[in-house]
Amino acid sequence: MRLRDIIFRNKKKASSELKGVVSNAEVDLILDHRIDAEKIRNIWNNYEKDYKLSASVVICGINALVDYIGIPVVTGGGRNRDKIQKHVDFVANSVHKKGFVEGNFFLWACWNDKKNDIDNIIYNFESMRKPVFDIDTKELLEVSFEHDIEFNDAQGNRRRCRRIRRFTQTHIYTRYEGDRQEGKEDTVIAHNLGRLPVVFVRYNRSLEESYGHGLIEATEPYLRVLSSVLLNRAIEDRRSSRRKLNITARDAESWLANTAMVNGVDTNGIDLESLDILFNTIGDDGVKEESGYINITPSAQDSLEIAKTMYACIREIMGTPEWIFPSKLGASFASVEAQVPSWIQHIETLRNNEWYTNWIEILELYNRTFSLAQGTSVKPIDLHWKRLDLETPELRAKIVNYMIASMKLAKENALMTDEEIRDYLDEYLNDLGDYASLSKAMPEMIERLTELSSAKKGGENEDRSDRNRPTEGENLITNEDRDKTQT
């Protein structure tokens, strides 16, 4: 593929090596028009040869997004809440990572009678067959999955069969083709979920599209160019850094054989391709042929600029600032402070827009599955996210001081109750626990925090020497005090 085809968009041919998703109702259900999810996973795992030198950029960026987005907190759901939260904690990072990488996958909350719990089963995008979508809302109404299964029969011979599992709004159909494994029978299972038993997780999907888009699909052309530039640069550096020989001989083969014999070297063990040797022969008329290396203008700076441009494009597509990458993690907070608000806004947008709908579907499926299995009514369920905390300890201490002073004034003037103060603190600190366990300790805690805040400022008649000044840590409630309060 030409460099121009990789960099620039072509109206008739996608620049990406991966097949782009076609947003067309007529062809949207055809496998040939969907992306190559298996190749995307290979890029993520750094198996693809053409992307080995650049895959680390997108791997690092996606890992950072997953870490900062965090795990949603389940609210509602009645008695099922704790059980659902346990499963959310277990699958959250995998769900986010797979969504960012591939853009499309399926999660089946399969009830396991033996464990009396849910098994989380993931189906990859490429195993999907015959999907049925609502033509207007793009909601998935029916879907099938095909998997090839290999097994050994009673005689130890290798066998293979194909399992086709079909999910509808009312039933789950399973059938097998080919060699039948013992104990594997065709089944039809009815369910009362009132919805599809699987959730189609789609990241970065437009309203008119049936499928989502992963970040590797969008960054693939730039990853390919970056890897190619780095590889060519490495080859050029290796070639220019090796010592070169310019040999004049009447017969190159006899010269090489004689030289190898004198030095006790087997000519079969000489790898001429790894050596920079130019042989010049002497003709019968005694005229010597000459050759030499062409001095090429150094292009390292140009390669560096191209690599920087590709790197910047990849970061822009992922929406990740430069300071989250390992090489920049040692930067001071002051040098990146201006970028923090936009990064927080980006994470909040991903949480509330891209991922909220997917998680609500997953939570509703969990909730209905638990309720039906246990014979309980289905309670409303929702989620929220913990506050994204990017402050340094010093900045956090200043903010807490301002908060305590404001809440003290509000409490003295009967503008805030203890419960409202707790909710305000909980939104910021995230770890104060339920109000029921803090209701009695709240006045004492507020008084203690107020004293610490006042100690920071100091009285007019107090000694202002260094030995009487509180440390930064004294402006915050310590972990030990917080643990005692929770207990």
Image (cartoon, grey):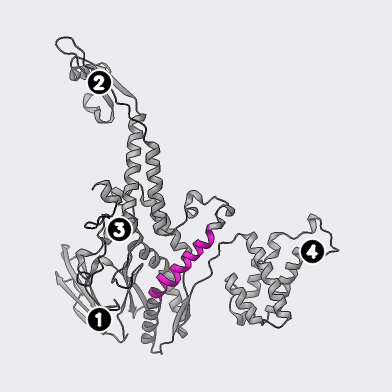
| Residue occupied by mark 3 | 40
**Of residues 37 and 477, which is closer to you in this image?**
37
Q: CA distance from mark 3 to mark 1?
A: 29 Å
| Residue occupied by mark 4 | 458
Magenta residues: mostly which secondary structure? helix
| Dot label at residue 291 | 2
Please report the residue visible at 36 percent of the width from the left and 34 percent of the height from the top: 237
Q: CA distance from mark 1 to mark 4?
A: 69 Å
Q: Between label 3 and label 2, give the one nearer the viewer.
A: 2
**Of residues 179 and 52, which is closer to you in this image?**
52
Q: Tell me which label, 3 or 4, sits earlier in the chain.
A: 3
Please report the residue visible at 32 percent of the width from the left and 31 percent of the height from the top: 239
Q: Dot 3: within a 10 Å radius of its alpha carbon, few (fewer than 14), some, or many (20 or more) residues?
A: many
**Circles 3, 4 touching at the beta carbon (< 8 Å):** no
The amino acid beneath tag 1 is: Thr
Q: CA distance from mark 2 to mark 1?
A: 74 Å
Residue 480, how many percent across, how many down? Answer: 65, 67
- SS at badge 4: loop
Q: Is residue 43 above or below residue 362?
A: above
| Residue occupied by mark 1 | 168
Q: Tell me which label, 3 or 2, sits earlier in the chain.
A: 3
**Of residues 254 and 301, which is closer to you in this image?**
301
* Segment colored magenta: 339-359
Q: Dot 2: within a 10 Å radius of its alpha carbon, few (fewer than 14), some, or many (20 or more) residues?
A: few
User: Is 348 situated left or right of 194 in this image?
Assistant: right
Q: Tell me which label, 3 or 1, sits earlier in the chain.
A: 3
Q: Is residue 63 above or below residue 118?
A: above
Q: CA distance from mark 3 to mark 4?
A: 60 Å
Q: Tell me which label, 2 or 1, sits earlier in the chain.
A: 1
Q: Tell me which label, 2 or 4, sits earlier in the chain.
A: 2
Which quadrant of the figure has residue 478?
bottom right
